[in-house]
């Protein structure tokens, strides 16, 4: 999922450089959403491992 967030971020930067502001804004929003989802899932997974007694990392 982090891979998709980075791809949309790069797509947004390229679209912004080419002047497609609407497309760039949409891509930034998608990249931000995917990054937040990835971050939340990572924290949940680390907490689940810690509660089972395993090392979180």
Image (cartoon, rainbow, N blue to C red):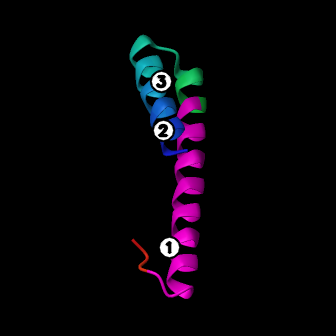
Q: Residue at x 58, y 46 (%)?
A: 34
Residue 16's place in the image compared with 41, above or below, is above
The answer to the question of whether label 1 and label 2 lie on touching residues, with beta carbons closer than 8 A, is no
Q: Secondary structure at mark 1?
A: helix
Query: Between 24 and 31, which is closer to the camera in this rendering?
Result: 31
What whole-number distance in Å separates the C-alpha atoms at marks 3 and 2? Answer: 12 Å
Residue 28 in percent (x, y) is at 52, 36
Q: Residue at x 55, y 54 (%)?
A: 38
Q: What kind of secondary structure does the magenta stretch mostly adopt?
A: helix
Q: Select label 3 or label 2 by which is in front.
A: 2
The residue tagged 3 is 11
Residue 16's place in the image compared with 7, above or below, is above
Residue 19's place in the image compared with 25, above or below, is above
Does the magenta-highlighted stretch encompass residue 33?
A: yes
In terms of image quadrants, where is residue 47?
A: bottom right
Query: Between 31 and 55, which is closer to the camera in this rendering?
Result: 55
Q: Secondary structure at mark 3?
A: helix
What whole-number distance in Å separates the C-alpha atoms at marks 1 and 2? Answer: 19 Å
Query: Between 52 and 33, which is closer to the camera in this rendering?
Result: 52
Q: Which stretch is magenta?
A: 27-54
Residue 3 in percent (x, y) is at 48, 38
In terms of image quadrants, where is residue 25?
A: top right
Does the magenta-highlighted stretch encompass residue 28?
A: yes
The residue tagged 2 is 3
Q: Residue at x 60, y 55 (%)?
A: 37
């Amino acid at each position: 999922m982090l891979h998709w967030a980075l791809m949309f971020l790069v797509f947004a930067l390229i679209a912004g450089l080419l002047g497609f502001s609407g497309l760039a804004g949409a891509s930034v929003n998608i990249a931000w959403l995917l990054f937040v989802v990835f971050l939340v899932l990572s924290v949940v997974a680390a907490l689940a491992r810690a509660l089972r007694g395993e090392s979180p990392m």
